[in-house]
Image (cartoon, rainbow, N blue to C red):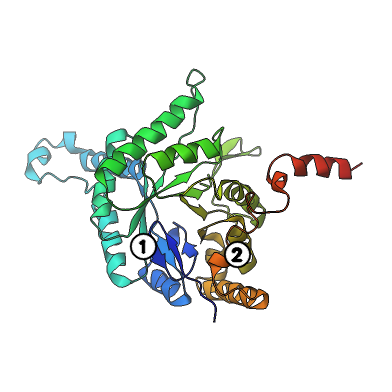
């Protein structure tokens, strides 16, 4: 009998498979299905400050439309205000009551004060931890990268000072030194990092000469970037490492654990195959462990990280040079 149990952000999980923040958490029945299929935990889709701001402006616009044409309308009807994050918070609380598996709230804000304000409110919903989804597109040519990183650290410090829950920071893959950023986060009392945030990119249609965006699922090849950095970070930080993006099969889960991942987050494969596919991935993990005589995931976690593998330079430039020479 194999033991899948692990600990993520100080929270015991029955296995390392985590349902990533996605539309799956928008339906209670699917959240329950994930728990029944064996999910170790689930991240509820993000509370987006920008969406709240947009909805607020849209409500004001619709309420004020045509009001000037009838002066009495300005005073006849009661004042209506946007509920802000209340709907999202109520949904998180409802989800918390529906299942017993660990749940993590996700937050994506913009303004400094909003980060701490919403973090406090999410912490009161009964979730087990908080995933800080930090995303900034650097477009100012006069603003150096160190300022972007400083913004991240200030946000993290402000949330850490206000929230006692364990915190994971979901990082972008575009920092100059990922290892240094993780080190700085560790110094600020964070419990884990999620590698990496997957950004949806705008596209251009030459036929209509317009810009458009569409939801495109991740591809298994995209897993190589977080896999590499987890292998590099394992043993260099005390933070838990959660792999995100590109994990589609049980085989991918094994690869992530061998690199040193504490947990493996997935969404695209569950949206494609159904939430019940979690049980298939767990079955693969079980069979793989039994074939090799492993009784727990701790026995092989990080076995092929840079710290423990036979050729540590494989995760740096060595494989690049080798592949180029092999082409000759």
Q: In the image, which is nearer the foreground, mark 2 or mark 1?
A: 2
Quarter-wise, where is residue 212 in the image?
top right
Residue located at (52% from left, 64% from top): 271
Q: Position of residue 97 (x, y in %)?
A: 27, 69
Extreme residue toward the right, this view:
328
Q: Would you say residue 310 is visible in this rendering? A: yes
> Label 1 neighbourhood size at 10 Å, few (<14), some (14-19), many (20+)?
many
The answer to which of 60 and 147 lies nearer the viewer is 147
Mark 1: which secondary structure? Answer: strand
- Residue 159's tag is none
> Is 37 on the left or on the right of 68, as rendered?
right
> Is 286 on the left or on the right of 126, as rendered?
right
- Please tell me whether residue 171 is drawn above or below residue 40 in the rendered image: above
Measured Cα–Cα span from mark 2 to mark 1: 26 Å
Q: Quadrant of the C terminus?
A: top right
- Please tell me whether residue 44 is drawn above or below residue 155 in the rendered image: below
Q: Quadrant of the N terminus?
A: bottom right
Mark 2: which secondary structure? Answer: loop
Quarter-wise, where is residue 243 in the image?
bottom right
> Is 123 on the left or on the right of 180, as rendered?
left
> Label 2 neighbourhood size at 10 Å, few (<14), some (14-19), many (20+)?
some
Extreme residue toward the top, this view:
142
Residue located at (64% from left, 66% from top): 251
Q: How many marks?
A: 2
The residue tagged 1 is: 103
Residue located at (73% from left, 39% from top): 317
The residue tagged 2 is: 300
Q: Position of residue 104 (x, y in %)?
A: 37, 58
């Amino acid at each position: 009998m194999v033991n899948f149990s692990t600990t993520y952000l100080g929270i015991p999980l029955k296995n390392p498979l985590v349902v990533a923040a996605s539309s799956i958490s928008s339906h209670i029945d699917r959240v329950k299905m994930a728990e029944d299929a064996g999910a170790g935990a689930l991240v509820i889709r993000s509370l987006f400050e920008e969406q709240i701001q947009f909805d607020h402006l849209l409500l004001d616009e619709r309420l004020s439309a045509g009001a000037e044409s009838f002066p009495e309308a300005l005073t006849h009807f009661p004042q209506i205000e946007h509920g802000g994050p209340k709907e999202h918070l109520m949904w998180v609380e409802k989800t918390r009551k529906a299942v017993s598996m660990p749940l993590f709230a996700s937050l994506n804000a913009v303004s400094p004060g909003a980060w701490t304000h919403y973090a406090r409110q999410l912490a009161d919903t009964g979730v087990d931890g908080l995933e800080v989804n930090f995303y900034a597109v650097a477009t100012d040519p006069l603003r150096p990268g160190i300022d972007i990183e400083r913004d991240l650290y200030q946000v993290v410090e402000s949330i850490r000072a206000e929230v006692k829950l364990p915190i994971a920071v979901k990082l972008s893959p575009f920092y100059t030194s990922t290892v240094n950023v993780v080190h700085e986060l560790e110094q600020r009392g964070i419990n884990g990092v999620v590698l990496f945030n997957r950004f949806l990119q705008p596209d251009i249609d030459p036929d209509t000469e317009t810009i458009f965006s569409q939801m495109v699922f991740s591809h298994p090849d995209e897993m190589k970037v977080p896999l590499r950095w987890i292998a590099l970070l394992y043993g260099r930080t005390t933070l838990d490492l959660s792999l995100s993006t590109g994990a589609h099969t049980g085989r991918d889960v094994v690869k992530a654990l061998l690199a040193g991942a504490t947990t493996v987050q997935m969404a695209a494969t569950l949206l494609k195959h159904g939430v019940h596919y979690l049980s298939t991935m767990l079955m693969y993990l079980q069979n793989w462990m039994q074939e090799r005589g492993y009784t727990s995931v701790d026995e092989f976690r990080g076995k092929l990280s840079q710290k423990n593998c036979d050729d540590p330079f494989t995760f740096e430039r060595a494989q690049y040079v080798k592949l180029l020479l092999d082409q000759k």
